[in-house]
Image (cartoon, rainbow, N blue to C red):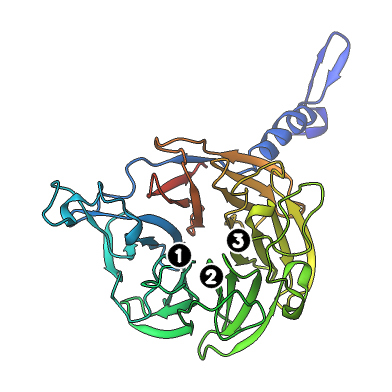
Amino acid sequence: MRIAKTGSRVGGLSICLCCFLVLTVGPMIRAQDVPRYKVDPSWPKELPNNWLPGAVHGIAVDKEDHVWLVNAPRLLPMNEAGAAQTPPRSACCVPAPSVIEFDAGGTVLRSWGGPGYLPDWPTYEHGIWVDGDGNVWMAGNSQSADPKFPGDRQVFKFSKDGKQLLEIGHPTRDPVNNQDTTILGAPAETTVDDAAHEVFIADGFLNRRIVVYDSNTGAFKRGWGAYGIPLSEIDNSALKPYDPAAPSKQFRGPVASVRISVDGFVYVCDRSSDRIQVFTKEGKFIKEFFVRPATLNLGSTWGLTFSHDAKQKYLLVSDGENGVVWILNRSDGTVAGQFGHKGSYAGQFAVLQGIAMDSHGNVFTSEVNPNARIQKFVLQK
């Protein structure tokens, strides 16, 4: 067969079928390059033991594709925890343990934690990460002034069975101090660089910084603020109201999420500034981009994860204020797509917080009150 002669003649014009296929199929393939997702309303399975979670402040996926959530049992409304009242006001329900592990099918495998579990157990559990050795990292982010509950200024490292391995910081009512590395400031999330044995902490709801500690010993290593400024230059006082036309030189916070890409860059969500800043692991500022910068109130950048292709072409950003997941081009932050909508039905979000991805490209999200739940979104091939 001689390809050069493949074609037909219509109205005096010679049409090359190969060229036609390039012009039509090529763009179609490129258009399908942006990942698409569909909610799986059957996942997870109903929780056992009459459990209901409080605000689900974090979600993570480990190397076995098991899904972990962390929730704040104290934030489960009394009318939903009727069976836990004295006397019980209803048949359902009781607060779930703080940390729950699911298999890929949505069945609970193990659970642990909750108020009183440890002397320094946080008032409000927040953020979860599972490192390469299967250890579970969790932050506390209460900014409570209640004398019964000192502020959460700590991060924990646990075995997967809930044994405490490390505590960085401690509960205290000390004032905000971005220069003090012995305590944290209502931290939001962690991520671990397994090869370097370092834990990066988004610190947080009181402080305005990224701090890095040895993930085995807890020794402080380094830290920085917005645009890579040193800790000594981070302002501890209240900042001016958000102005989209004049980006703050400080993290306005909360510094809500920190993640490391496959090519070694650190991505940080500055939530109420509607932006993501990118750094080297040493804290050198690389670039920033804004995610719907007209968003006011609680901001647009709550959490992030990377697409599962080898080069992590896309960023997926959870937006609790707008109720969507943004799909951004990682190269420049431009919007390539989105999914979700404000609401309480399957596939919708009331206050979307955490986001994670498994090895197959499926996305998992967590929400705080009023929905207080996790959802699975299946990657469409």
Q: Quadrant of residue 331?
A: bottom right
Label 1's element? Answer: strand
Label 3's element? Answer: loop
The residue that mark 3 highlights is 254
Mark 2 vs 3: CB contact within 8 A? no
| Comes first in the chain, label 1 or label 3 | 1
Q: Residues within 10 Å of mark 3 (few under 14, many from 20)?
A: many
The residue that mark 1 highlights is 126
What amino acid does circle 1 point to?
His
Q: Is residue 217 left or right of residue 78?
A: right
x, y percent for residue 153: 50, 76
x, y percent for residue 326: 61, 45
Q: Disc 1 versus disc 2: distance between alpha carbons?
A: 8 Å
Q: Is residue 292 above or below residue 216?
A: above
The residue that mark 2 highlights is 187
Q: Quadrant of residue 270?
A: bottom right
What amino acid does circle 2 point to?
Pro
x, y percent for residue 334: 74, 46
Closest to the observer, 343 or 82: 82
Q: Is residue 283 left or right of residue 160?
A: right
